[in-house]
């Protein structure tokens, strides 16, 4: 039942790096408003924006043994994605594991549980998106699995999927859709750049997007304040 | 049922700016410990302190159409205040809408829901107090209302009321009470300045406020540790 | 029933300062994974790391009178630890009380409730770990107790116990165990330093900790991806 | 600042009783999906369905003095609606107060806080919708107000408004709209009765409501499973 | 992007009915402690225990249009499983939709959102497991999908998977594993029956499961109370 | 570090049974509003009211091994009180363990975590107060301790303390105070009986408790509605 899957397929590096530049909100919109992890997944420090290939870990509550196992499966450009089999706020991950992952070129950690050594992780510049911050230690007694499909913070994630994370949260793009989603993200950004310039110049979205007629048809009324 | 109220009355600019200087905790105390929004309303970045006239938006869950409508009703010195008709963590607002509001001189956003593009909003210096951060997109299908009385995060807000927001949270001052509350806030600050000096010099609040007798009457006992 | 206990015993200053250097995660592990306060206790600003002797306050909901009483019992190197008798998010503590505590050399505040004047406290460099940030004011009507045993955020705390707090949260060390726990913390740090160097050099925890055989015995299987 | 307003206007009894029969979901829909209190307001026992005139109480956290004051303002057919000025789970209300309210013909209690003596209240048949159940006692030290406008669980309530409560939660109907809303509720019920019969007979909502064309226009595709 | 998948494969009825008899806790253990939905999914009334084939619905926040579409895809023995694309407590489902589903032989509803008409649903005997109870109405404006893979309350669910639900919560069994899991559940029940008899007779689990030696090896000490 | 303490002292049975009759709210008031567990501790079924001697269990997250150990330390009239060392919603306890405890005369379970087999426990009449209901299974790998002081749901509990639990929640009475608290509870009940009769007869608490003068002194004003 407990298995470590080796040599998972990954998306091309240039696709991954392109998605990192677009950021979570754009990518999420570009792939049809899907793939977002729950809003309780928060960065331990502001300003990081990363993308990478998911190395997934399914793990028991309060037991971080499989994270040690997962490190070996990580390579340059990966992001570790950890989900406990039942809700737990324990601090599964700290500075020593970060040193180990950084030595392998891993870009960050996504964990639907707790993380600790936040001050050290911040100093190291190793970004983490977690549900909790907690110093509570874990045991190393029970197996889990590495690189199997998991659900993390409400999103279904396959090993090798592309993870994008920034101050808005975390989004997953299925590996085989990475190229298409990147294309759509770029198109979206181009379109937004044009709109942005007009909005900054004081034009209204109501006019740019041509919303007035449909609002009227739906029955929206304008009245003056009687106060 | 869906209505946009134009030309709402607003408080005088000098009252608004005075209240911003006092800050949330002082204003809230000065008006008799009323008007505070729930403590889950948090700033997306630390350090901002603003006040402005409320342009209110009542909006369906997962639908930000009425925010586009509301932009047109905003003017220099306003704060947009958005409340969904039922609890929702969706990201109703992002950087493009902020550009549009900034072009009109709007000072910030209060939203009992989600916000996205947090990194860009921080870079722009457009402050937001929200319940959630979420990249989840919204639709534009259902009407709501602009500049009607709303309840936002447990506080009743009329269009044109004065909103004060800082790292402590968000407070609303009814428009017609703005002058009185500013006066009371200033008086309170003056009094606190005097107390602050004495406390810094090592005097005790117990003595400054003359609390010892009442504590004794209530039955407070002092004993020495037996450890 | 309401009592203020004076002249509580405290741990030696050098033990306290040593524990501050070790930090919450290390101290918590070193004393057998006990003493951690709940993960909802968060610092109002990042980067502070303190330790001190607990002056404890048991306090009614929405009433901060006893904090004023407690100030007098504080001395250089103390940390004030406040727990309401029932859950409440009110802002019991602000900048004036911080000025008073700083005048006495108090190092910080731990409160399982709300705090306000966060901007001022940050500017003053007075660190607070709280459950909420809220400007909501309190009354001064009902007695509580100072320097009695309390439960704060799920941890049992005696007056004079050593409190350690940093970005990971808050931990309590029983006063009489301070020396032993400091020793174990230092031993742990030394051991971690050696492991850290090896991990940074790319060695795996699997090998450093000799985990491979036990994983195999438990039945962990390695397979190659079939994708 | 603290005031008790006497002799508030109330809606006609037959309107109130009519709204009770319609129940929360129907009334809420009939008045345009407004007026619902937050979904965390739950009944202490299943099966009760009441309506009555709101006697409102604004009350400090952990202090139930004003409930005693409010009892005197209650009359046959009223519902007491209590909202603390800041979030608190204390048990403000128990069996003795229920006896007192029942002696005056009060129909139930709505409280955005805690309630206790749940077993006795159930035996008495006195229904309560609350946010919490808690035995934690309160003090009687600080004033509040009776029959002023309040926000309770996110809904704005005026004294004399009609409250409807059942297993779905709690809804408020502004007093002056009671007649119109009752009419619309009855119309809605009649329409639903016709639809119900057809649905029970196996007809589909898709056909009864004529949804198929609009779904197709929006682009909905039907495909057969390839599994 | 929005699609309705027809004619999904389903597990054999006798397997489904067998799993219902085993109940959630047993089935969840029998398939290796996987498949459980989050513990916030609660039944609207106690005592129901059902199993059925999942008809899945992915749905926007605050919009129940696709539930009407899904009804047509349901048949005798199915369970409707609904998950919104972002967190929302709106009441998507009520008594009329239940009548429609019951006319088709559907056994119940699992919804990670709100449900209303709880009193009527209880009277009808139509069981629902939901995250919220709320009367808040929804719109019918935006498409979603029926019978696509979804994540509901943290569990990954394919259309046609077997859903088991009782007072302990909700569990999903992949369709192709239904036979194996039923077998393991039955084996587990048989084993438990033997243990139950011994426990009722006063034998200890410590002896029945032979735990004493391993506890001693791990270092468990027994001492007598010194109080 | 892991220890099982045998032969703990217990309160006299007649004191325990007397406290059960008084119930949680009365006992909690009678001992000065202390000892209540957090309001999220809820009974799995309504109507039970028990008291007993605490057999305490400190237990790792997701691991129920020590409950098996604790059973042996239980005797007629005990209540098992279980607290995990970090927050966890796993289902540590089910019907088989209940059979074992019932064979020893144990009266119920208090657990700040999850419980399962709720339907069976209800049928057996074995009452449980828990934070969660969850079928998620646990492992048996890591030691904890039995009959050591614990914090459960925010309350400090010593082995042998008296636990009282009913529909209002759970309260702990220190063993050595049981006689005094029972006395005070009885006195309180007698006083309440007299008040109850007067309230039922329509007298007001305002008059019975003589509150009017103090309310006036505090500044309460009565005005007539101007609506």
Image (spheres, coloured by chain):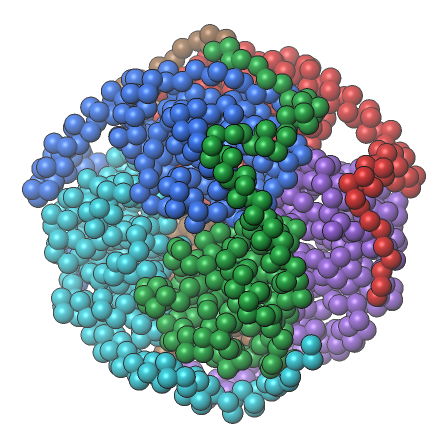
Chain colours: A blue, B cyan, C green, D brown, E red, F purple
Q: Residue furthest right?
A: E201
One can see residue C20 in this view: yes
**As drawn, is B27 to the left or to the right of D84?**
left
Give the x, y percent position of residue D74: 50, 71
**As drawn, is A206 to the left or to the right of B45?**
left
Residue at x 73% of width, y 36% of height:
F140
**As drawn, is F88 to the left or to the right of B115?**
right
Residue at x 14% of width, y 69% of height:
B14
Name the residue nearer the viewer: C191 or F207.
C191
Relative to D192, say whether F105 is above or below: below
Residue at x 48% of width, y 47% of height:
A117
User: How many marks do you count on the picture?
Assistant: 0
Residue at x 82% of width, y 55% of height:
F5
Name the residue nearer the viewer: A107 or E147.
A107
Give the x, y percent position of residue D146: 43, 72
Relative to E227, say whether E195 is above or below: above
Name the residue nearer the viewer: C58 or A199.
C58
**As drawn, is F114 to the left or to the right of A38?**
right
- Quadrant in which the C terminus of chain F is drawn: bottom left
Relative to A227, say whether A21 is above or below: above
Give the x, y percent position of residue B69: 18, 43
One can see residue D183 in this view: no
Using the rendered view, name the quadrant where residue A171 is placed: top left
Name the residue nearer the viewer: B48 or F20.
B48
Give the x, y percent position of residue E194: 87, 29
Relative to E134, say whether B6 is above or below: below
Using the rendered view, name the quadrant where residue A204 is placed: top left
């Amino acid at each position: 039942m407990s298995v470590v899957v080796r040599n998972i397929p990954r998306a091309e590096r240039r696709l991954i790096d392109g998605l990192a530049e677009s950021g979570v909100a754009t990518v999420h919109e570009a792939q049809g408003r899907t793939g977002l992890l729950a809003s309780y997944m928060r960065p331990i420090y502001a300003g990081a924006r990363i993308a990478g290939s998911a190395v997934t870990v399914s793990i028991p509550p309060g037991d971080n043994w499989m994270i040690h196992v997962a490190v070996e499966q990580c390579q340059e450009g990966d992001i570790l994605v950890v989900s406990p089999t039942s809700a737990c706020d324990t601090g599964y991950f700290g500075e020593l594991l970060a040193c180990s992952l950084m030595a392998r070129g891993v870009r960050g950690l996504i964990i639907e549980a707790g993380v600790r050594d936040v001050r050290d992780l911040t100093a190291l510049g190793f970004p983490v998106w977690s549900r909790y911050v907690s110093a509570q230690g874990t045991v190393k007694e029970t197996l889990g699995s590495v690189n199997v499909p998991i659900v993390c913070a409400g999103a279904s994630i396959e090993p090798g999927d592309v993870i994008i994370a920034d101050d808005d949260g975390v989004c997953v793009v299925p590996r085989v859709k990475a190229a298409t989603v990147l294309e759509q993200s770029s198109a979206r950004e181009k379109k937004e750049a044009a709109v942005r310039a007009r909005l900054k110049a004081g034009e209204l979205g109501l006019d740019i997007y041509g919303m007035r007629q449909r609002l009227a048809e739906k029955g929206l009324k304008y009245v003056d304040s009687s106060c």
